[in-house]
Image (spheres, helix red, strand yellow):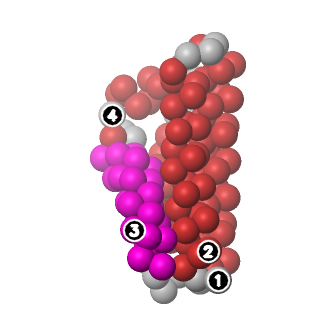
Amino acid sequence: MKTNRIVYWTATIIIFLFEGVMPAFTSQTQMAKDGIRHLGYPDYFGTAFAVFKVLGTIALLVPLVPKRVKEWAYAGFAFDFLFASISYFCVEGVGFAAFFPLIFLGILVASYISCHKLNP
């Protein structure tokens, strides 16, 4: 039980920092806007991504959030990581940038599995 709790909180905090804090502070920078444009997405996607990422991480962190909402947050982040990887593969080809989101998908899976072990 203690190991599951440590894995859950460690993985979830990493997701929170990468998907919640970073987009909240950097989504309106020129570099972020150029990155979104480089992948072929319109500018407003950056703002929408940032809002939903922050809301999703809050849903994962707050214990009182209903389980169904957490499931949607996990699904949203899984799609986000998968589609980010696909976007990089299509635009830049095979490289570290294309595999980087898949690393965080693995961290997300660890958070998801440990969450279900803590709250069956």
Name the quadrant containing residue 115. Answer: bottom right
| Mark toward the start of the polypeptide (4 vs 3) | 3
Q: Do the residues labelled 3 and 1 touch (CB within 8 Å)?
A: no
Could you say which is closer to the camera, residue 46 or residue 53? 53
**Residue 53 against residue 81 in the figure, above or below:** below
**Label 4 is placed on what type of residue?**
Thr
Q: Nearer the viewer, mark 4 or mark 3?
A: 3
Residue at position x 46%, y 67% in the image: 8
Name the quadrant containing residue 80. Answer: top right
Q: How many angstroms separate mark 3 from mark 2 (CA)?
A: 13 Å
Secondary structure under tag 3 reads helix
Residue named by callout 2: 116
**Residue 36 against residue 46 in the figure, above or below:** above
Residue lying farthest to the bottom in this orientation: 64
Please indicate whether residue 61 sits to the left or right of residue 86 in the image.
Answer: left
Q: How crowded is mark 4: few (under 14 residues within 10 Å), some or many (20 or more)?
A: few
**Residue 68 forms part of the magenta stretch:** no
Residue 120: image tag: 1
**Label 2 is placed on what type of residue?**
His
Residue 67: image tag: none
Q: How crowded is mark 1: few (under 14 residues within 10 Å), some or many (20 or more)?
A: few
Secondary structure under tag 2 reads helix
Residue 6: image tag: 3
Q: Position of residue 20 (x, y in %)?
A: 40, 55
Magenta segment: 1-25
Q: Nearer the viewer, mark 1 or mark 4?
A: 1
| Mark toward the start of the polypeptide (4 vs 2) | 4
Residue at position x 60%, y 55% in the image: 109
Residue named by callout 4: 29
Q: Quadrant of the C terminus?
A: bottom right
Residue at position x 41%, y 31% in the image: 32
